[in-house]
Image: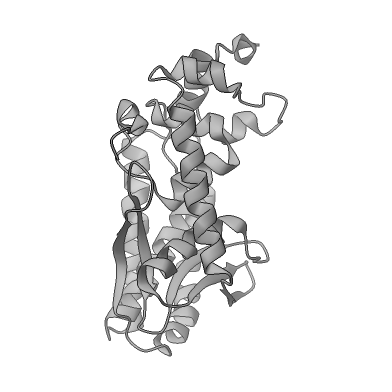
């Protein structure tokens, strides 16, 4: 496509996560593509990455479960060491240790359930789709079988099928022509459960994914100057939202101040 407004912002592709970020908070997405980002560190995110690492190791190999758990623990420690290196002061290290202790019992229960599906075709496979957008949509499939595509979500609250999951899995299903499923690993201090949700109406959700991509395209087409885009689109972070300073990191807050001229942030 000749006209590519994403080029002005160094955006080479879209992804389910970037499209969902735009859908939820377009002002924050605009700040992010302008170079204002904060690291995504939290005990829950680190735990989810480690659980996924252990599960995929257990699916793709016949290794003993303790080896799969070791791979998850190493991944968790890698993230922990990166946070120390980055001097990430807002991380709850007590919660981090608590989550680390949960890895072994969780994976001991969940890996055998995954092995019942047989060996996957692939894990963490990159998919790239070129549709009627200036840039491709790229994603990574957690686990692909010849009969299904599955994405692993780890949660501490009762799982439910969210719209962002449907948009993400529609991409994978459309790319591989197999039914999509969300596998929610539900973990509390007293139990571990695997909740599986099929995704219906894949064509609808894929069309919705592309539609949002077109909205993003039209937004950036307003100007190559991000401040002009912010002004012309009337986008603005919602400072009345009590969660603003929890959901926006220090770099993103600085970006919001610069791009949207928000003097209220200093108050």
Image point (44%, 86%), residue name: 112
Near-viewer residue (236 or 215): 215
Place of residue 54 in the rendered image (x, y in percent of width and height, measured from the top left): 37, 71
**What colour scheme does the image use?**
one colour
Near-viewer residue (253 or 168): 168
- Which residue is farthest front? 2
- Based on the displayed image, in which of its 4 quarters is residue 217 positioned? top left
From where the camera sits, is residue 35 visible?
yes
The foreground one among 194 and 121 is 121
Q: Is residue 213 left or right of residue 35?
A: right
In the shown orientation, is residue 141 left or right of residue 61? Answer: right
Locate residue 241, reporting x and y percent. 71, 30
Query: Can the viewer see residue 98?
Result: no
Quarter holding the C terminus? top right
Q: Quadrant of residue 108?
A: bottom left
Note whether 252 is above or below 105 in the view shown: above
Which residue corresponds to the image point at 62% horizontal and 60% vertical from the top-left?
162
Total number of numbered discs in the rendering: 0
Please state if 221 lies on the left or on the right of 239 as rendered.
left
Taking the spot 50% from the left edge, 53% from the top edge, the residue there is: 209
Q: Is residue 161 above or below residue 224?
A: below
Counting from the top left corner in percent of width and height, residue 51 is at 43, 66
Picture quarter with the N terminus: top left
Image height of 139 relative to 227, above or below: below
Query: Which residue is pictured at 29% across the width and 74% down the height?
Result: 122
| Along the viewing direction, whichever of 105 and 149 lies nearer the viewer | 149
Relative image position of residue 212 (x, y in whole percent)? 52, 45
Residue 121, above or below 205: below
């Amino acid at each position: 496509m000749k006209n590519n407004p994403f080029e002005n912002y160094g955006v080479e592709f879209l992804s389910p996560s970037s499209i969902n970020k735009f859908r939820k908070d377009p002002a924050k997405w605009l700040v992010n593509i302008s170079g204002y980002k904060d690291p995504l560190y939290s005990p829950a995110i680190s735990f989810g990455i480690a659980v996924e690492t252990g599960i995929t190791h257990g699916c793709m190999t016949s290794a003993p479960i303790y080896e799969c758990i070791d791979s998850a623990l190493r991944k968790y420690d890698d993230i922990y060491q990166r946070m120390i290196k980055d001097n990430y002061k807002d991380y709850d290290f007590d919660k981090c240790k608590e989550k680390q202790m949960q890895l072994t019992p969780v994976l001991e229960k969940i890996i055998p359930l995954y092995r019942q599906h047989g060996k996957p075709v692939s894990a963490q496979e990159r998919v790239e789709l070129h549709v009627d957008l200036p840039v491709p949509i790229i994603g990574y499939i957690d686990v692909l079988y010849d009969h299904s595509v599955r994405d692993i979500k780890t949660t501490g609250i009762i799982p439910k099928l969210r719209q962002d999951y449907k948009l993400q899995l529609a991409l994978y299903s459309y790319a591989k022509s197999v039914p999509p499923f969300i596998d929610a690993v539900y973990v509390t201090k007293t139990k571990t459960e695997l909740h599986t949700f099929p995704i219906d109406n894949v064509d609808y959700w894929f069309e919705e994914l592309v539609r949002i991509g077109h909205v993003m395209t039209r937004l950036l087409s307003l100007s190559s100057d991000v401040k002009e885009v912010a002004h012309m689109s009337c986008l603005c972070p919602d400072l009345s939202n009590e969660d603003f300073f929890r959901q926006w990191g220090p770099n993103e807050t600085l970006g919001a101040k610069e791009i949207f001229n928000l003097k209220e942030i200093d108050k």
